Image (spheres, rainbow, N blue to C red):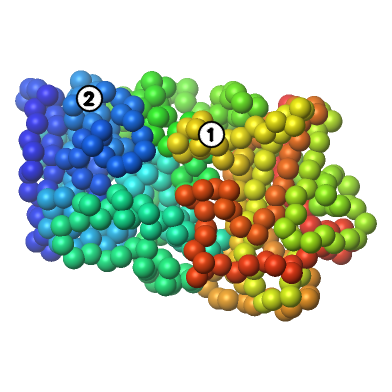
Amino acid sequence: MRIERDVVVPVRDGTSIVVDVFRPDGERPVPVIASMSPYGKDVHWPERFPMYELVEQGAHMVWETPNPEWWTERGFAVVRADARGTGKSGGALDVFSRQDAEDFYDVVEWCGAQPWSTGKVASSGISWYAMMGWHVAALQPPHLAAVVAWEGCTDFYRDWGRQGGIYTNATENWWRQQIIPQLNGEHASMPQDLSSRELVDDWYRERTVDLAQVRVPVLSAGNWGSIHLHLRGNVEGWLGAASEHKWLVIHVGSHVDPYYADWAKDLQLRFLRRFLGGDRTAMDGVAPVRLAIRRGHDVEWRDEQDWPLPRTRWRRLYLGPEELGWDRPAEGRTPYPATFDFTAAERLEITGPVALRLWVSHVADDLDVFVQLEQYDAGGQRIPGIGPGGVATPVPMGIGWLRASHRELDAERSLPHRPWHSHDEVRPLEPGVPTLLEVEIWPTSITLEPGQRLQLRVQADDDNMGPLAHDDPDDRKHGRGATIHFGGDHASHLYVPVIPD
């Protein structure tokens, strides 16, 4: 492997973006895998704060990026860039801005024009790198041939910054610990921008991918357990991308381990050999959708043809007095927050997006609704989802959020199973009047065996999510004094994707 460090790539406004290049020995041109982030191209994984141990050995391993040793052995060059204003690159960082994406565009085009390059470039990586892949694909650089988007996001407001309209203040800790140490000059403050902007505006629109402009082949991978950030965007990205060739994979595991697993590297290699190497048969036999169906504590991989699954039977589980059931109950009410339980009489698979139609009234003019789905075995033991930190960080099996004053729907984009809130106006509640809230619950896969229980929690907070909680005291609309209505004309219910055997 040949290594060239601190190569200067001048971008369109004259700023210097600095990259490292890893490529195979020899003079034969090779395809390129590129990435750019503010995490530090020179920060060896074990030196990085915080969280995950080095999951794949290598002297040149950098957080969430392809392993240069593994990929160069298979005939690819790997290029890593420091984002503007971080590491050794010049300029001022303004994350996910148009300029950020244009810098990556220019890095991609530089990679494609080098004598050691075939002119075919892919973006690949986890999280931030996946997000930049979506963004640069929408700009359509001529040398970009494919994108591997692994656990990223595409809608900066709904996926990350303001989930359900509620400020995602976990961003502040991430910014302080993972971004600030890499800054080398002036920069915009992403947490400050997020906390000060409650409604969708041009700032958010600039940072949301125009998926209709994504036309290169895409391998989009989400994680059932990354329900705080890295699931919805990969599903919506796959659905919305205009690409002729696209694949969706939803797996389980920690936030980083699956990307480096043998099955995942094999899939990535096949995908990149197909669209960078010209092997037209490399993806033969790979279904458009591959899902790790959750069966209790285990998973069963299954190939599908579309999302949501075409054979889905959409059914309603009605809220009643402390329970969920297929039959609409008599009209009633219960104090908010509340839990509702359903016990399966036979095997029941729920795989896909879920929506909660919730009738509430409140003494005040606003409240934040936090929705969680939990699974329990026949003995009453919780079956949690595997969270971003692995089995040590259990999470609910499904989750959703909504600020009541953000309940207005975009009629053109909303679907019965996936309400789409416009988030462009505040509509206060009329105190005491029952009002329908349609809560988007991010996609899930839950299999209930006979005697197992599905629990719907309608909560006043999500403090049980630990560091992922929405707990900024200056951005909370509390629900003390609220009431949940059910049955009759106010038939609150879960709209669930039942998959027949």
> In screen coordinates, is 101 left or right of 499?
left
Disc 1 marks a residue whose amino acid type is Ile
| Location of residue 499 in the rendering, given as x and y in whole percent from the top left corner | 71, 34
Give the residue at x 47% y 59%.
Answer: 168
Q: Mark 1, residues whose alpha carbon is within 10 Å: few (<14), some, or many (≥20)?
A: many
Q: Could you say which disc has been placed on residue 208 in the image?
A: none
- Decide: is 7 above or below 499: below
**Which quadrant of the figure contains the N terminus?**
top left
Residue at the spot of label 1: 386
Disc 2 marks a residue whose amino acid type is Gly
Give the residue at x 14% y 32%.
Answer: 22
Looking at the picture, tell me which residue is in the foreground, 266 or 398: 398
- Decide: is 165 above or below 234: below
Q: Are marks 1 and 2 in contact (CB under 8 Å)?
A: no
- Decide: is 449 above or below 123: above
Residue 480 falls in image quadrant: bottom right
| Location of residue 230 in the rendering, given as x and y in whole percent from the top left corner | 46, 45
Q: Mark 2, residues whose alpha carbon is within 10 Å: few (<14), some, or many (≥20)?
A: some
Q: Secondary structure at mark 2?
A: loop
Residue at the spot of label 2: 58
> In screen coordinates, is 306 left or right of 155?
right
| Location of residue 430 in the rendering, given as x and y in whole percent from the top left corner | 72, 79
Q: Secondary structure at mark 1?
A: strand
| Location of residue 277 in the rendering, given as x and y in whole percent from the top left corner | 26, 28
Q: Does any portion of residue 232 appear in the rendered image?
A: no
Give the residue at x 50% y 32%.
Answer: 392
